Structure formats: C-alpha cells, structure tokens
Amino acid sequence: MAETAAKARKIKAYRTGLEAEDHAAAMLAQRGYSVLARRFRSPAGEIDLVATNGSHLSFVEVKARRTLADAAWSVTPRQQRRITEAAGYWLQSFPEYGDRDITFDAILVAPRQLPEYIPDAFRA
C-alpha cells in the first residue's frame, strides 16, 4: 500500500512540474522569448527551459513549491552547478548560440500566486 501512495505522489509531482514549466514557457513567450528546448537532459543534469530573445540566451530553472519563498530556497548551490554544467553540454550541441549573452534565470511557481521571473538568478 505504501508503494502505491509513493507512486501516486511521484506522478502528482511530475504533473505539477510539467504544469509549472507550461506556465513558465508562457510567461517567457509574453516577454518576447522563444523557447528552444524543454527538459534538456545531459550527463550533468537537466535544464528545464532554454530560451532566447534577440542576442540573449537564458537557461531557466523552474521551481514549483507551496510558496514562492520555498521555491526560491530550492534552487541550491549544488543544483546551480549541475545546471551550469548542463548548459555547457547544451552549448556543445548547439554551438551557433555560443555568441549570445547568457544568463541563468529562475521562474518560481506557487499555487494561487503569479509566477515570479528572476532574471540572472545565479552565475556560472
């Protein structure tokens, strides 16, 4: 029985993450960005969204939690390192974007609150 409950929690968390990424992608589109990749996986880790706007390239971490503050705290230094390393893999795969201004952004999502976009949330 506990196994079934754990599986249900994982499925719910997965769906919540997909919904948060959908909201984040829509938010970026409203700001003039084009989403180039979603859930890019590399040996170093996963990048939720890769988006571009003119000469700007953003690697975006999307966090959904009960509060925006909890979401902000969940972007840990360890996770930041994994994202920056994964960005290196993405740039190796798409070298035509290597000359862009690059930032590591975050979009925080919480129930019944507007998502919060944090440009340049952390540095490589």
Image (cartoon, rainbow, N blue to C red):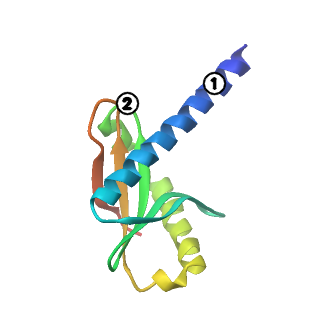
Residue 76 drawn at (x, y percent): 44, 50
Q: Is residue 96 left or right of residue 112?
A: right
Indicate the quadrant where residue 77 lies. bottom left
Reply above or below: 103 against 15: below
Within 10 Å of disc 2 (Cα), the crowding (few <14, some 14-19, many 20+) is few
Check disc 1 and report the residue beneath it. 8
- What secondary structure is marked by label 2? loop
Q: 71 and 55: which one is in front?
A: 55
CA gap between label 1 and label 2 equals 18 Å
Quadrant where the N terminus is found in the figure: top right
CB of mark 1 within 8 Å of CB of mark 2? no
Q: Is residue 43 left or right of residue 86?
A: right
**Residue, disc 2:** 66
| Quadrant in which residue 61 is drawn | bottom left
Give x and y (percent) for residue 59: 43, 64
Q: Is residue 75 visible?
A: no
For the point 36% across and 60% down, the residue is 105
Residue 83 visible in the snapshot: yes
* Observer-nearest of 7 and 30: 30
